[in-house]
Amino acid sequence: MRTALYPGTFDPVTHGHTDIVDRALAMFDRLIVAVANNTSKSTTFSVQQRLELLKAVIGDKPEIEIVEFNGLTAHYAKERDVAAIIRGLRAVSDFEYEFQMALMNRRLVPEVETVFLMPRGKYAYLSSTLIKDVARFGGEVDLFVGEPVAKMLREKLKNEE
Ligand code: ADP
């Protein structure tokens, strides 16, 4: 059984993230989608909401576990004894940071490889931040996120008004 870990903030999950989940599952037997709890980023959605949205969008699949984690990705990868860490690469702009992080993680846990996957072209420009901006200014986000995410974005915005 080969298990991979897909860590991220998922604030909120987009079709770009789920595209990467599908690709990772084609390569590994099991996938742990792990929501960073104590991230230095301030998030729009709580960790419970981010988990709830991932579960709603991905559904119940025996080969996928959706969890939260604290601390370093490398430490969590070791604790869960995974073969690989999955990261998505959108554009060249992602590369520098992701490359640094992959090399740092290799220093911390040499036995875990980082695997970079590219989403299909139409999702290559999607980011959670961009989607929140579109939603905030009244744009349609239904093409980029699942229905439960679009609904929660609308509710969140109503509360911001
Ligand atoms: P993080 O804060 O860890 O970067 P994100 O939730 O923004 O968390 O992203 C998690 C992972 O998913 C990262 O590897 C990121 O590059 C990737 N990702 C985000 N959006 C997309 C997308 N549209 N296509 C492919 N990969 C993506």
Image (cartoon, rainbow, N blue to C red):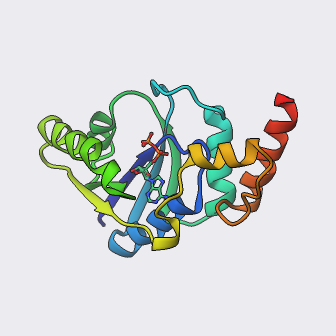
Quadrant assignment for the N terminus:
bottom left
141 to the left or right of 103: right
Please indicate, yes or no, whether residue 52 appears anywhere in the rendered image.
no
**Residue 158: quadrant of the picture:** top right
Which residue: 62% across, 46% down?
A: 12
Which residue: 70% across, 61% down?
A: 146
Which residue: 30% across, 55% down?
A: 92
Which residue: 12% across, 44% down?
A: 110
Relative to 105, does residue 83 appear above or below in the rendering? below
Relative to 154, does residue 118 appear above or below in the rendering? below
Q: Position of residue 22 (x, y in %)?
A: 47, 70
44 to the left or right of 4: right
Which of the two residues, 80 or 11, is positioned nearer the viewer here? 11
Q: Where is residue 153 in the image (x, y as percent from the top left)?
A: 76, 45
11 to the left or right of 125: right
156 to the left or right of 77: right
Relative to 108, does residue 115 appear above or below in the rendering? below
Quadrant assignment for the C terminus:
top right
Q: Position of residue 137 (x, y in %)?
A: 76, 44
